[in-house]
Amino acid sequence: MRRRGEHEADGCVLVIFGATGDLTRRKLLPALYYLARDGFLPEQFAVVGVGRQELTEAAFRREVAKNLREFVEEKVDAKTAKWLTQRLFYVGGDFTTDWTVFTDLSAQLKRASSDFKIPGNFLFYLALPPALFPVVAHRVHEQGLSAETDGNWRRFVFEKPFGRDLASARKLNSDLQKIVRERQIYRIDHYLGKETVQNLLVFRFGNSIFEPIWNRNYVDNVQITVAEKLGVEQRGEYYDTAGALRDMIPNHILQLVTLTAMEPPVSFEPDAVRDEQAKILDAIKPFSKRDLDKTVVRGQYSAGKIDGAKVIGYTREPKVRAGSKTETYTALRLAIENWRWADVPFYVRTGKRLATRHSTILIQFKKAPFTLFRGTTIERLTTNRLVIHIQPDEGITLHFGAKIPGPLVRTGPV
């Protein structure tokens, strides 16, 4: 059942470009459902979906209801789902070439605002390839929908990836800042919405027992893994131009690296946290060509079986180029050259069509000296590990050794 919350957001219309895409179905719509369920969305709220498919409003609402049943990780509450779906509107068409889409969007915004008595606050969420960001933002601006007047706000959320490389990211920033103000721009990595990721700073800096040993004196290595069982599915056209490295490393995984390795910020304010994360990025040792064979691994999945079911190889996926060499798996060894992490390797890995789906941060501590246990039945000591489980099962586990009950001195993992 939908609850009324103490921390409801401002009334607004959320516009999702890419409303029929994979990210919207799997992530955005379930997120909206959870927010509605927990009372964070106000009564003055509506969603206008913009997609390339020509759908009626009723068809779009049915599709969203179906997606909620499929991707919400609990039994969907009928009243909450109804509350959300009745606030859905839709505009269909190719918004890269058909500029009438934006006049239709303007009309739908007026209709949604009128139906639910929403003030002129608009949030534009672009779940699109980065090449389309300035195109769509410019067309929205031309319709007069980006101007902030009468105390109302207009915000633009740009989903990762933000460009393809440094040059394209800089150009993208320059192009967008010609259209809207910097304070209206939000560059988003949806991975940061995961509860355990948000808990990292509290876990590290809110507990005095871990911070003293969170350094090169006690840590042997750090391992960050984001493994997926799914293939590229319907994202072949995009994925074939990006690959595992561009799709995951500069955003999801480097966010986890910086949150794990950063120094304590002076406050929990966004700029203070960002500044400490940026210091870690500056400290990562650049790769050299002569060391690539020792620090980088790339691979691509082939045909096989997952959970006993046959799956096709990457080059047989829809919209993937025949003979493509794009990697679907990559692993890197990073070196952070600062006082805290000198000589502590950070191993990061990510891939699709792997045996299990899991995302973890593993802190492996150095072994204790064996000297004390010479002459006993103990052959080796258990390595202490702290594992932060991000998905699918969120939580934190600590692994250490203890004596096994009995007359002999034997140890086992706990």
Image (cartoon, helix red, strand yellow):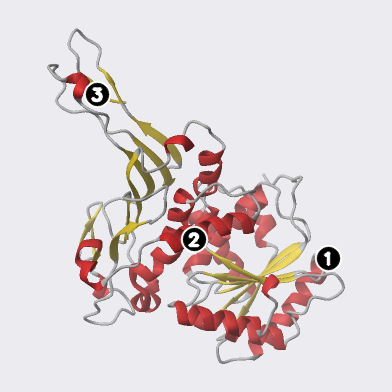
Tally of numbered tags: 3
Q: Are marks 3 and 2 in contact (CB under 8 Å)?
A: no
Pointer 3 or 2: first along the chain:
2
Looking at the rendered structure, the kind of residue marked 1 is Lys
Vertical position of residue 400 compared to residue 2: above or below: above
Q: Quadrant of residue 285?
A: bottom left
For image coordinates 31% across by 50% down, the residue present is: 343
For image coordinates 19% across by 14% down, the residue present is: 409
Q: Give the mark toward the camera: 3 or 2.
A: 3
Residue nearest the viewer, comparing 5 with 309: 5
Residue 373, given in percent of the width and then of the height, sits at 19, 20
Residue 411, given in percent of the width and then of the height, sits at 23, 21
Which residue position holds label 3?
412
Task: Mark 2: give few (<14), some (14-19) or many (20+) Cα within 10 Å.
Answer: some
Q: Give the mark toward the camera: 1 or 3.
A: 3
- Is disc 2 placed on a helix, strand or loop? helix
Looking at the rendered structure, the kind of residue marked 2 is Arg
Residue nearest the viewer, comparing 380 with 109: 380
Q: Quadrant of residue 281?
A: bottom left
Pointer 1 or 3: first along the chain:
1
Residue 63, given in percent of the width and then of the height, sits at 54, 66
- Is disc 1 placed on a helix, strand or loop? loop
Pointer 1 or 2: first along the chain:
2
For image coordinates 32% across by 33% down, the residue present is: 384
Task: Mark 3: give few (<14), some (14-19) or many (20+) Cα within 10 Å.
Answer: few
Quarter holding the C terminus is top left
Which residue position holds label 2?
26
* Residue 66 seen in the current view: no
Q: CA distance from mark 1 to mark 3?
A: 63 Å
Which residue position holds label 1?
117
Task: Mark 1: give few (<14), some (14-19) or many (20+) Cα within 10 Å.
Answer: some
